[in-house]
């Protein structure tokens, strides 16, 4: 049985100028734990610098999980140089923002992604997102084009990637702009992640407790 697509948390809007807000009916997997350690496939253009940001973010989350005493870890990361389905990512965002975030609304190209967790490094103008589980318990993350604001600001893309992976793990939003998982409905925008020195913003203590609730010390993988 698929997880409920209703949540009080709202999708992280990765464009400061976007005023649209996802309805609660569009929300998906926040609070739902992985049953197994997901293998990660990152799809993007050759020499895309965000491949390295994904590696950094996965290491951050696995280190955080270890620090809180969880038995869960994200799996290995595989890089694939391949075309990104930009129109399908945009269609998924439009579906989410339009309140149609269920499995039936997932574009065909995203229904059987190559990884358990597939991260598409887009180049076009869409809202970064972490998508719902499909029937095979796979999940998709779409990342907005790196040359588009605010992704082109120093340090922003790094935190947007980590933020969306946080959603893919199961965390929702908080209202503190000094924390990694800040997002709507609070007045948080990705531009607050701007920094001259590369850094990942921290988690709240509540989020650390939530990670341990979803993924306790005795967490063991189960069949999808």
Image (spheres, grey):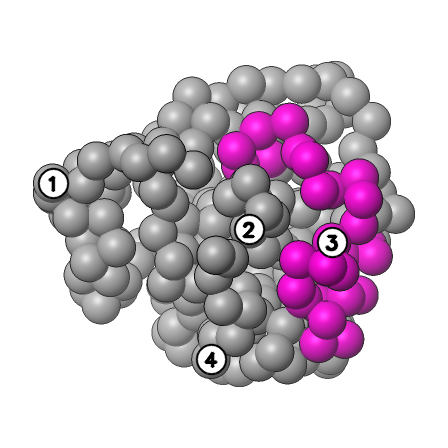
Query: Which is nearer the eye, 219 or 23?
Result: 219
Q: Nearer the viewer, mark 3 or mark 4?
A: 3
Q: CA distance from mark 3 to mark 2?
A: 10 Å
Q: Are marks 3 and 1 in contact (CB under 8 Å)?
A: no
Specify which label sits upstream in the sequence, 4 or 1.
4
Q: Which circle's residue, 3 or 2, is located before the other in the chain?
A: 3
> For the residue labelled by badge 2, is the local secondary structure a helix, a strand or a loop?
loop
Q: Is residue 137 visible?
A: yes
Going from N to C along the chain, the mark reached first, 4 or 2, is 4
Q: Residues within 10 Å of mark 4 (few under 14, many from 20)?
A: some
| Residue that mark 3 sits on | 106
Q: In front here: 142 or 155?
A: 142
| CA–CA distance in space, label 3 to label 1 | 33 Å
The crowding category of the residue bearing disc 2, from other C-alpha atoms within 10 Å (few below 14, some 14 to 19, many at least 20), is many
Q: Which quadrant would the C terminus be assigned to in this image?
A: top left
**Residues at circles 4 and 2 in contact by the CB criterion of under 8 Å:** no
Q: Which mark is residue 181?
A: none
Q: Which residue is mark 4?
A: 8
**In this picture, residue 196 sits left or right of residue 69:** right
Which of the pair 41/199 is nearer the observer? 41
Q: In terms of depth relative to the viewer, which is nearer, 40 or 81?
A: 40
Mark 4–mark 1 contact, CB under 8 Å?
no
Task: Establish if 19 lies above or below 30.
Answer: below
Residue segment shown in magenta: 90-118
For disc 1, the marked residue is: 218
């Amino acid at each position: 049985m698929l997880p409920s697509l209703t949540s009080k948390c709202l999708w992280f809007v990765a464009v400061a100028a976007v005023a649209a807000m996802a309805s609660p009916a569009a929300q998906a997997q926040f609070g739902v734990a992985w049953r197994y350690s997901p293998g990660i496939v990152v799809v993007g253009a050759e020499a895309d610098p965000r491949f390295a940001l994904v590696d950094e973010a996965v290491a951050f989350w696995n280190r955080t999980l270890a620090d809180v005493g969880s038995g869960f870890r994200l799996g290995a990361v595989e890089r694939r140089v391949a075309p990104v389905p930009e129109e399908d990512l945009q269609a998924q965002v439009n579906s989410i923002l339009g309140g149609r975030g269920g499995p039936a609304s997932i574009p065909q190209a995203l229904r059987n992604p190559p990884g358990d967790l597939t991260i598409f490094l887009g180049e076009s103008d869409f809202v970064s997102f972490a998508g719902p589980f499909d029937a095979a318990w796979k999940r998709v993350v779409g990342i907005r084009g790196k040359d588009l604001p605010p992704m082109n600001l120093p340090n922003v893309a790094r935190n947007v990637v980590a933020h969306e992976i946080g959603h893919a793990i199961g965390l929702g939003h908080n209202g503190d702009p000094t924390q990694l998982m800040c997002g709507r409905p609070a007045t948080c925008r990705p531009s607050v992640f701007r920094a001259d020195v590369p850094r990942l913003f921290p988690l709240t203590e509540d989020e650390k407790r939530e990670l341990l609730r979803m993924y306790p010390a005795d967490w063991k993988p189960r069949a999808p």
